[in-house]
Image (spheres, rainbow, N blue to C red):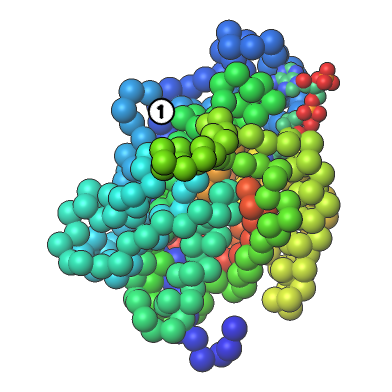
Amino acid sequence: MTNKIIPLKIAGVGYSLPETVITNDDLTKLYETSDEWIYSRTGIKERRVVSGNQNAVDLGFEAAKKAIERAKIDPNEIDLIIAASSAPPDLYPAIACHIHERLGIEKQIPAFDITAACSGLIYAMSIARAYIGSGMYKKILLVATDNNSRLVDWNDRGTSILFGDGAGAMVVTESEDGIDDIIAIDIKADGNYGHLIELAFDGHNCPLVEQNEVRPVGIKMNGRGVYTFVAKILPHYVEELLENAGMKAEDIDYLIPHQANIRIIQAVQERLGYSDDKVVTNIKYYGNTSAASIPIALAESVEKGNVKLGSTAILCGFGAGMTWGGAIVRLRDGIC
Ligand code: UT7
């Protein structure tokens, strides 16, 4: 980053969750498991799932409306929509295009989706950082929404216990007071570990040629492999993010991490030396909502008063790819 970039303001955040709660006890109707097994290994007690025709667009739209309202802008002022999802209802139209339509935006603006799994919000923020920083766009809507419950294999007890549905949104704008709300941001990927979490999207070859092997639909995860990989890199990565920003752990008020496994969150917490009141966790109630997890944790903790505004926070996440990323942000009054 150079000093010449235009500063960015986080203007509003919002989230949305489906109403239906599935507890660990409910899952015992599907396979042999127990609340004790799931809770002790993951920190999860329950998760929210869509029912009927509700999907990631509906959830994303609700979250977006709240973020826009809190940013005090008219949807027609938005210059760009980026949606991050790895559990969309359609590959196209993109979720971002659906949201453009649902918000009733009259202007023809760019709208596209990105897939960076659970790191999606940080990736989207990084893209927004570049667009706003260059002066190309002034007001950007970011939506992170995942309907995992439709894509997990509900026969796979090692994976389906983890995931839930939800959406979070963030409006970022050019900062008019010169204060930049993204103090630091970084994103990474290592495709060599792509096999750890996969979601196949196979069709059939043209009937006139040799047929391909069609892989089964459903999230396939090597849970132990993901755990080992992330526990090894994430605490050090977050420390490095701070170091590169010329900051120390004690300079930051809160840690708002991706909610994938309470033990991974605790490993980062320990490395930073943070007390529990500095760390946002809601995994107990929502499980892993993929890209939506960080913005839900952010908006909900502010709404509930667990995170005070006029503060700073480290956001960090990781997911399929493997991808990971982190941001140090300022949380201004009025964003929620
Ligand atoms: O954003 C996506 C990121 N993903 C993650 O963060 C996942 C990180 N990994 C984890 O959270 C953990 O690896 C899991 C919670 C997914 C699994 O815990 P684990 O201690 O790594 O279990 P495991 O997969 O090694 O399985 C241990 C045993 C196996 O039985 P055997 O082979 O030892 O007899 C499994 O069959 O536990 C069994 N098992 C279960 N038992 C009861 C697996 N799932 C369950 C279950 N209930 N739900």
Spot the residue most to the top: 29
Picture coordinates of residue 315, whole percent (x, y): 61, 58
**Amino acid type of disc 1?**
Val
Q: Is residue 162 above or below residue 252?
A: above
Q: Quadrant of ligand 1?
A: top right
Q: Is residue 282 visible?
A: no
Residue where numbered disc 1 is placed: 50
Picture coordinates of residue 230, whole percent (x, y): 76, 49
Q: Nearer the viewer, residue 2 or 311?
A: 2
Say whether residue 196 is left or right of residue 47: right
Q: Nearer the viewer, residue 132 or 252?
A: 132
Which residue is pictured at 63% across the width and 48% down the height? 320
- Can you say which quadrant of the picture contains the N terminus? bottom right
Spot the residue most to the bottom: 4
Spot the residue most to the left: 106
Q: Nearer the viewer, residue 86 or 29?
A: 86
Q: Is residue 157 visible?
A: yes
Please tell me how crowded label 1 is: few (under 14), some (14-19), or many (20+) other residues with Cα within 10 Å: many
Which residue is pictured at 51% across the width and 37% down the height? 211
Which residue is pictured at 46% across the width and 81% down the height? 133
> Tag 1, which secondary structure?
loop
Which residue is pictured at 76% across the width and 62% down the height? 237
Say whether residue 320 is left or right of residue 14: right
